[in-house]
Image: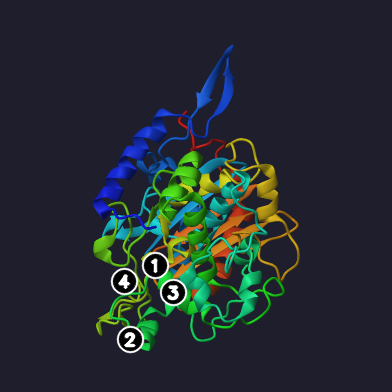
Amino acid sequence: MQLDISRKGKIAAAVLAVVAITMVALASTSRKKGHEEVTKIPINLNATLVNEMSDTSVLAGFDNQVNNYMTQWGLKGVSLSIMRNDSLLFAKGYGVADSKQPMQPGNILRMASVSKLVTAVGIMVLEEKGLLTLDDQVFGPGGILDDSLYNAAIKDPLYYKITVEDLLRHKAGFSKKGGDPMFSTRWLMLQNHWKTVPTKEQLTVVQLQRPLAFEPGTWQDYSNFGYLALSMVIEKISGMPYEDFIQEKVLHPAGCVGFKLGGNYYVDKYPEEVRYYVQKDDEPAEEFNNSGRKVPRCYGGNNIEGLLGAGAWVGSTPELALLVASIDGKSEVPDIITKESVDAMTEYFDPDTFSLGWNDTKPTGEWTRTGTFAGTSALVKYFPDGECWIFISNTSTYKGPALAKHTTELFETLRARYSDKFPKRNMFYAE
């Protein structure tokens, strides 16, 4: 089931959600003031935070190092948020959001595969409600996506072994041989003589017709399609469109009111969304819909909308920090999932096993989530000491996903010099 709603309708609905969220304590905590209990409600971060609230005058050289990093990699704009033990210490934009408009903490940006973390939380919510288990079969008779169209497409019986957990951990057996179906739209249209962009149902049939590369659960191979399938699992189990479920059961309970599913083109962008840029030497790409036009790779090179929970979310770094605070097992910001679910998502097995939603979690307590598109580089790094640094740029580089390694090095340099200099405060809440 898909939601048939205009983009203006989405924006209006989001505005109404902001009003509703600010009227109730969706993620409240209490503190004593005299003999009274005072409820703390997360503020509307995107509407409230501005660069001036993260004064760096006490952090001599901090801005220079961030700006130097941007110059080194040709980044037009960057949003950076820093949290410690569920307290938002810092949120600031650097460079431009769009043309000459300065980047602000409330600007929203594509987060690419960081979206997978959001989807994984949605799955854990369904598990906690008793509506599915991670061991549930996904495809074939008796599976969650038991559909005559899909069942007819399956030729490899190994598909019947795929579980929800296999999808979460990229262990389902999918291979990019023949092209990643989520990023091969134009090629698939040519191959199948399609005149229109394939639906998620058509993409699923294409994938199910392919043999699996390995027996589910025995190995891993990063799969964007796996998280599209999880988006469809959420829709089937909840009876709601994917976006509606995530907004209602994950984001709003966490106090995040500015997340949205993004669009493919500049004309589709939300008022508070940034402009995306590619590196200077990036050649125009064939438009994903097989129109024959050449377009900037970040605006029409891929079908971002079609990714759903695999990569379509846009949001601000402060709200992304608030979401992480809501799934980290710490108490300052109440979690929206149980400690058992937090532990399951962050459990470490070995270097060859993906965590649930996170790229990687180490036994030390360090968690990592990355995301990359043309026009986007995102990194969420949760450190063992409770600090979480979140970086999203509106510019891609020739390094692609490898830029995350250099951003991690920037984080480590800045942490070594400035961690003990951040003011003690929590910008998640109004003081």
Residue 203: image tag: 3
For discs 2 and 1, the disc positioned in front in the rendered view:
2
Which residue corresponds to mark 2? Answer: 193
Q: Is residue 30 left or right of residue 243?
A: right
- Which is nearer the eye, 228 or 155? 155
Name the residue beneath numbered marker 4.
299
User: What kind of colouring is applied to the model shown?
Assistant: rainbow
Distance from label 4 to label 1 (Cα)?
A: 14 Å
Indicate whether 203 appears above or below 387: below
Helix, strand or loop status at disc 3: helix
Q: Check disc 1: other Cα within 10 Å, few if <14, some if 14-19, many if 20+.
A: many
Q: Earlier in the sequence, mark 2 or mark 1?
A: 2
Labels 3 and 4: the sequence-earlier one: 3
User: What amino acid is at disc 1?
Assistant: Gly
What residue lies at 25% left-to-right and 54% top-to-bottom?
6
Question: What secondary structure is found at the residue carrying circle 4?
Answer: loop
Q: Are marks 4 and 1 in contact (CB under 8 Å)?
A: no
Q: How many residues crowd mark 2 within 10 Å: few (<14), some (14–19), many (20+)?
A: few
> Label 1 belongs to which residue?
306
Count how many numbered circles sit on residues in the image.
Answer: 4
Q: Are marks 1 and 3 in contact (CB under 8 Å)?
A: yes
Above or below 135: residue 189: below
